Amino acid sequence: MLEAAVQGYLVALSLILAIGAQNAFVLRQGLRREHVGPVVAVCAISDAVLIGAGVAGFGSLSAALPWFGEAMRWLGVTFLVIYGALRFKAALRGGEALQPSEAGSAPLGKVLATCVVLTWANPHVYLDTVVLIGSISAQHAPHQAVFGVAAACASLSFFTALGFGARLLAPVFARHSAWVWLEAGVGLTMWAIAAGLALGG
């Protein structure tokens, strides 16, 4: 049981650590100190639901619904291209949030809606959580549930550290140019992921 818990935590953490659209968004919200708690909660709960689905044996969803994967892929590509363009636009303006304490806070609903789309419209999320974690959990029978809970805990701890730990970089992002580079970097990340999805990655 302990081995299943440790493996579940480490496997999930290794998958989440990769730079992606969701992580970039959480980092940006953390630096802006804007709705960090709700954003972290949405990410962690979404991962927990998907991990639970994978552990419960729903990794064959894409096989049962052949159109599902393609639909999610192109939805993800479209959204990432648009969101990346918005980040480049913000960079050209000099950074959307040069002074987080002075900038107007985006509405909570808008922030959470963006977070939900970045999470659920990314086919890689399903591959990592539902398919990969689900299949690995089967190797730890009869402790698949322990494996899944530990994996969900890894997601929660990572997003909490990323979102609330971002403020430690506040001195760096007190500089005008840092926000410009952040916005441009997020835009590049979004477009790179979109290109990978469009090419079938």
Image (cartoon, rainbow, N blue to C red):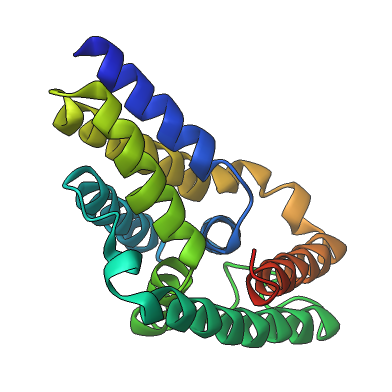
Determine the image quadrant of residue 62: bottom left
Left or right, 148 with respect to 21, comes to left
Q: Is residue 94 visible?
A: yes
55 versus 173 height, above or below: above
Q: How many tags in the picture?
A: 0
Which residue sits at x=27%, y=21%? 5
Image position of 83 (left or right of 1): right
Q: Is residue 34 visible?
A: no
Examine the image and state in which quarter residue 126 appears. bottom left
Q: Which is more toward the observer, 122 or 60?
A: 60
x and y percentages locating residue 191 in the rendered image? 73, 74
At x 28%, y 48%, the residue is 51
Q: For the N terminus, which image quadrant?
A: top left
In this image, 126 relative to 139: left or right? right
Q: Residue at x 67, y 67 (%)?
A: 193
Between 127 and 177, the one lying in front of the other is 127
Residue at figure coordinates x 81%, y 86% from the top left: 93
- Quadrant into which the C terminus falls: bottom right
Which image quadrant is residue 112 in?
bottom left
Most extreme residue toward the top is 2
Residue 178 locus on image (x, y percent)? 81, 60
- Compared with residue 99, is residue 37 higher up or lower down, i.e. above or below? above
Measured as percent of width and height from the top left, residue 155 is found at 38, 42
